[in-house]
Image (cartoon, helix red, strand yellow):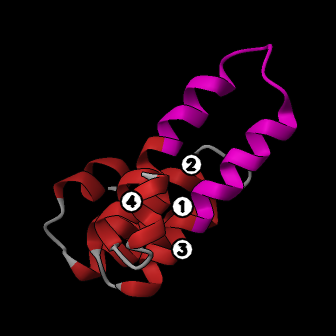
Amino acid sequence: FENALTSETNNKVLLMGYAKTLIRLHRLLAKDEVVNADDLNELAAKTREYLERALQLDPNDTLLLYEMAQYWQDFPGQRSQVQEYYLRALEQDPSSIQCLMEYG
């Protein structure tokens, strides 16, 4: 992903795909007690950066908004962020099954 993003810095699909991969990696590593908290924080910051870049390209993309909500779910005390992104996604596509199942 990183190599592809060097030549296609504004490719929303690549940005979202990489962010989704990083979300999964973060969740996997967070379960491992050996992993350094600083490394997890760095990974989380990188994930957020890619999601925000993708959202700048298309702020009304339902799937991107959903992924941002999924990102925020991993952090305690961020319920308002999660709600905001699920609601924004549902505003764009009221029939979004993913969002309705998660948030509804």
Q: Give left or right: position of 90 versus 51.
A: left
C-alpha separation, residue under disc 1 versus residue under disc 4: 29 Å
- Mark in front: 1 vs 4: 4
Residue 69 percent location from the top left of the image: 48, 59
Residue at image point 52% right, 44% down: 22
**Which element carries disc 4, helix, strand or loop?**
helix
Q: What amino acid does circle 2 point to? A: Gln
Q: Is the C-beta separation of discs 1 and 4 under 8 Å? A: no
Residue 52, labelled with which disc? 3
Residue 33, labelled with which disc? none
Q: Is the C-beta separation of discs 2 and 1 under 8 Å? A: yes
Q: Counting other residues with Cα less than 10 Å from the Cα at mark 4, is it few (<14), some (14-19), or many (20 or more)?
A: few
Residue 18 percent location from the top left of the image: 43, 52
Q: Counting other residues with Cα less than 10 Å from the Cα at mark 1, is it few (<14), some (14-19), or many (20 or more)?
A: many
C-alpha separation, residue under disc 3 versus residue under disc 2: 16 Å
Tell me which segment is drawn in magenta.
Answer: 22-49
Q: Give left or right: position of 95 versus 91.
A: left
Residue at image point 38% right, 73% down: 8
Residue 73, labelled with which disc? 2
Residue 29 belongs to the span the image colors magenta:
yes
Residue position marked by numbered label 1 in the rendering: 82
Q: Give left or right: position of 65 versus 39.
A: left
